[in-house]
């Protein structure tokens, strides 16, 4: 049987924990701060999540409602009832705010750059991204904490160990091994924690931020496509009101792009 197979996991963990000394508290504080930022980012992103499928083609009902919003305008209460029924966090939803801004615009005026480019929505996603960046910054400090522990452990190993004549060899070796353990385990713990935090942050928060940004871009594309179309209208969509027709939307879109 291999020698490593006989290692007691519990004793090994106790050795690691005791060897870390004050650095275990530094790691705990850093991880707590990272968890706070990640929780904040998840909470904000959850409020901004897209409530309906934006994959092409949209279902007839949703496309008809969007067509009505684009060519007739729509009050916030109608937007809430058609697209966000039963959602208690509608007021802070990214897509709700964009649809309300689009539906309350002047149909005869060109689209504003803010609506064309989704400036306000992009800014809010940037704020959520900054939370993720803060978490990554704190995670980047973990290897620095590990390196500090390594330096302190090596320093103590050479200058803090009693090598004077008459000192028992067992005592000297125990002091030496404790300092080497601090040097090794702080680096190992820092690297493991850094990898774990980076993987979690990338495959959860940052991935969903990118997905939400893509959904915003899809929604802008759908609304601008509908704005440039007057016929054929989606099934069930009412006739355009005078002064707010589909033909009147296309010049506004072109002018807005200029």
Image: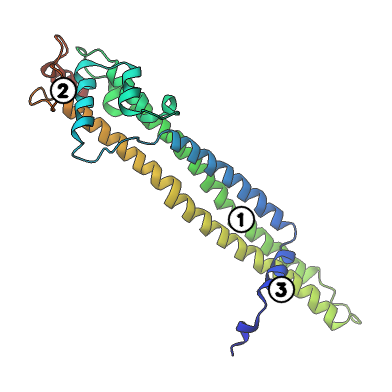
Kindly identify the residue that appears in the image at 59 percent across and 88 percent down: 2
Identify which residue, 197 or 153, lies in the foreground.
Answer: 197
- Relative to 170, residue 28 above or below: above
Residue 144: numbered disc = 1
Circle 1 crowding by C-alpha within 10 Å: few under 14, some 14–19, many from 20: some
The residue pinned by badge 2 equals 237
Instruction: Please name which of the two marks, 3 or 2, marks the residue nearer to the observer.
Output: 2
Task: Name the spot of residue 114 as percent of width and height, x first.
Answer: 31, 23
Q: Secondary structure at mark 3?
A: helix
Kindly identify the residue that appears in the image at 35 percent across and 29 percent down: 95
Marks 3 and 2, the one that precedes in the sequence: 3
Task: Name the spot of residue 180 as percent of width and height, x first.
Answer: 71, 71
Marks 1 and 2, the one that precedes in the sequence: 1
Cα separation, mark 3 vs mark 1, equals 27 Å
Task: Name the spot of residue 143 as percent of width and height, x first.
Answer: 59, 57
The residue pinned by badge 3 equals 11
Kindly identify the residue that appears in the image at 18 percent across and 39 percent down: 57
Task: Name the spot of residue 219 as percent of width and height, x first.
Answer: 27, 32
């Amino acid at each position: 049987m291999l020698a490593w197979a006989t290692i007691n996991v519990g004793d090994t963990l106790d050795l690691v924990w005791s060897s870390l000394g004050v650095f275990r508290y530094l790691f705990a504080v850093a991880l707590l701060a990272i968890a706070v930022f990640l929780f904040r980012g998840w909470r904000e992103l959850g409020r901004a999540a897209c409530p309906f499928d934006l994959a092409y083609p949209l279902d007839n009902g949703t496309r008809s409602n969007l067509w009505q919003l684009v060519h007739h305008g729509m009050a916030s209460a109608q937007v809430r009832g058609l697209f966000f029924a039963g959602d208690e966090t509608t007021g802070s939803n990214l897509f709700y705010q964009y649809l309300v801004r689009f539906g309350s615009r002047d149909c005869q005026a060109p689209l504003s750059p803010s609506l064309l480019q989704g400036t306000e929505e992009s800014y809010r996603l940037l704020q959520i991204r900054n939370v993720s960046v803060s978490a990554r910054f704190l995670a980047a400090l973990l290897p620095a904490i590990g390196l500090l522990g390594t330096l302190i452990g090596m320093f103590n190993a050479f200058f803090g160990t009693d090598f004077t004549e008459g000192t028992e060899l067992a005592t000297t070796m125990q002091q030496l091994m404790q300092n080497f353990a601090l040097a090794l385990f702080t680096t190992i713990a820092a690297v493991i924690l850094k990898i774990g935090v980076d993987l979690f942050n990338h495959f959860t928060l940052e991935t969903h931020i990118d997905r939400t940004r893509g959904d915003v871009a899809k929604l802008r594309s759908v609304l601008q496509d509908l704005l440039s179309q007057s016929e054929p209208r989606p099934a069930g969509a009412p006739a355009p009101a005078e002064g707010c027709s589909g033909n009147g939307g296309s010049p506004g879109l072109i002018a807005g792009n200029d």
